[in-house]
Image (cartoon, rainbow, N blue to C red):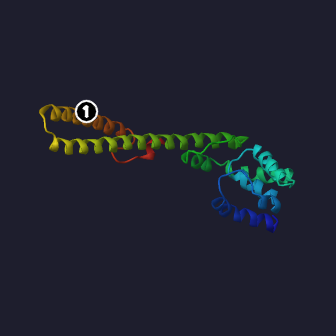
Amino acid sequence: MKLWKLLTLLALPTALALSSGCAVISENECQAGLWYERGIEDGARGRSQATVYKIAQKCHEYGIRTDTAAWMQGHEQGVEQYCTPENGFVVGRRGSNYEGVCTGPTADLFLANYERGLAVYQAEQQYAALAKQYEQAEREVYRIEDALDEAESKEERRALRSERRSLLREMRHLEAEMMHFGGFGTFNPQLFY
């Protein structure tokens, strides 16, 4: 392997971490060229081949021509890095979109693991929504208890107690729902692997 290719592959994780998730390219990046390297980066991020057309259009606005063939070669190499079963799980676990870039035998393994990771992500989002509802209900119960101390009439106290009972029932229901996700106050992702 040529030295510059090796250096590009070694620098790829840093480049991926430092660069933004946006597919649009700046004028400086267009002028720099590095189409092969840019293709590797975009492929390793799971971006589709349509990305090169967006890049070419943007660079054309700056009066710069892209080397789409070099980008496509790099993209193919980047996609190989992206389309691993392990990365499929990571991409799904983040809740990221999959643009369908994987092909061949790796596609099925990637997709199966992506769907597993996505299931964990979605379960965690559902759990977070339940926990948020629970916290809101709990705050409302505290507000009602403060209002009970200051209530001036029987009717007002009766209405507040009724509202508090309703909220406490809702909180018990939310606690039971959260148990499906590993327990009250604890999300257990292992249940969804």
Determine the residue located farthest toward the front in the rendered image. Answer: 152
Between 185 and 110, the residue placed more toward the observer is: 185
Q: Residue at x 80, y 68 (%)?
A: 3
Give x and y (percent) for residue 70: 84, 54
Please state if 118 lies on the left or on the right of 18 as rendered. Answer: left
Is residue 24 shown above or below 9? above
The x and y percentages for residue 48 are 73, 44
Rendered image quadrant of residue 146: top left
Q: Is residue 180 above or below residue 17?
A: above
Q: How many marks?
A: 1
Asked whether 6 or 13 is in front, the reply is: 13
Q: Does residue 24 lie above or below 123 as drawn? A: below
Coordinates of residue 51 in the picture (x, y in percent): 75, 46
Of residues 158 and 90, the one nearer the viewer is 158
Graded by Cα atoms within 10 Å as few (under 14), some (14 to 19) or many (20 or more), the crowding at tag 1 reads: few
Residue appearing at x 70%, y 53% in the figure = 44
Residue at label 1?
166
Q: Residue 94: image x %, image y %? A: 55, 48
Q: Give the secondary structure at mark 1.
A: helix
Q: To which quarter of the image does residue 8 belong? A: bottom right
Where's the N terminus, which quadrant? Answer: bottom right
What's under tag 1, amino acid-wise? Ser
> Which residue is at 63% across, 60% downward?
17
Closest to the observer, 43 or 192: 43
Left-right relation of 192 to 103: left
